[in-house]
Image (cartoon, helix red, strand yellow):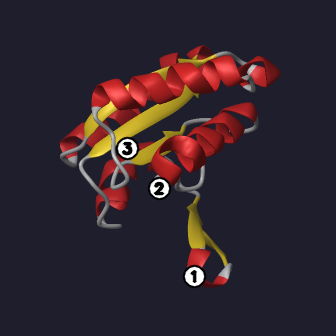
Amino acid sequence: MNIDVQLGSRSYAIVVERGALASVGARLKSLGVGSRAALVSAAGILSAHGKTVTESLEKAGFTVTTLEVPDGEAAKTLGVAERCWNALLEAGLDRTSTVLALGGGAVGDVAGFVAATYMRGVMTPPPC
């Protein structure tokens, strides 16, 4: 099932289905983005679902950099953002690259902030 979020030129679909994380790579590739992606998440979510998302992205041809951030509000610091920016630079992400948030709340907040401020903004789809 898809839930369409109507926001004009920024509209998107929320995909609700069993196994949806295994199709993240194909869905992202269909958007015509660059071949590098950063996956931002907290440790618990990464251990439960990170492998599925990473494998999906790699199968679709993406080079993936995984960024582990602290749980909760502890992720919302400039120190965490700086570590993420440095990791993106080291991995060679550019303005055609994508930053993905795996999780919600603070993970989505920090991933969105990092993407918006890195090289004046890279693509950030809605959190997985």
What residue is rendered at 35% in x and 41% in y? 37
On screen, residue 54 above or below 6: above
Badge 3: few (under 14), some or many (20 or more) residues near its Cα, within 10 Å? some
Mark 3 or 1, nearer chain start: 1
Q: Which residue is mark 3?
A: 22
**Of residues 10 and 86, the one drawn nearer to the viewer in this rendering:** 86
The single residue placed furthest to the right in the displayed view is 73
Q: CA distance from mark 3 to mark 1?
A: 26 Å
Element assignment for label 1: helix
Q: CA distance from mark 2 to mark 1?
A: 14 Å
On screen, residue 10 above or below 38: below
The image position of residue 9, as x and y in percent, is 57, 82
What residue is rendered at 30% in x and 28% in y? 91
Mark 2 or 1, nearer chain start: 1
Q: Which residue is mark 2?
A: 123
Type of amino acid at the residue the image marks with label 1: Ser
**Of residues 118 and 11, the one drawn nearer to the viewer in this rendering:** 118
- The answer to whether the residues at label 2 and label 3 have Cβ atoms under 8 Å apart is no
Q: Which residue is mark 1?
A: 9
Type of amino acid at the residue the image marks with label 2: Met
What residue is rendered at 46% in x and 52% in y? 122
Badge 1: few (under 14), some or many (20 or more) residues near its Cα, within 10 Å? few
**Can residue 121 be seen from the camera position used here?**
no
- The answer to whether the residues at label 2 and label 1 have Cβ atoms under 8 Å apart is no
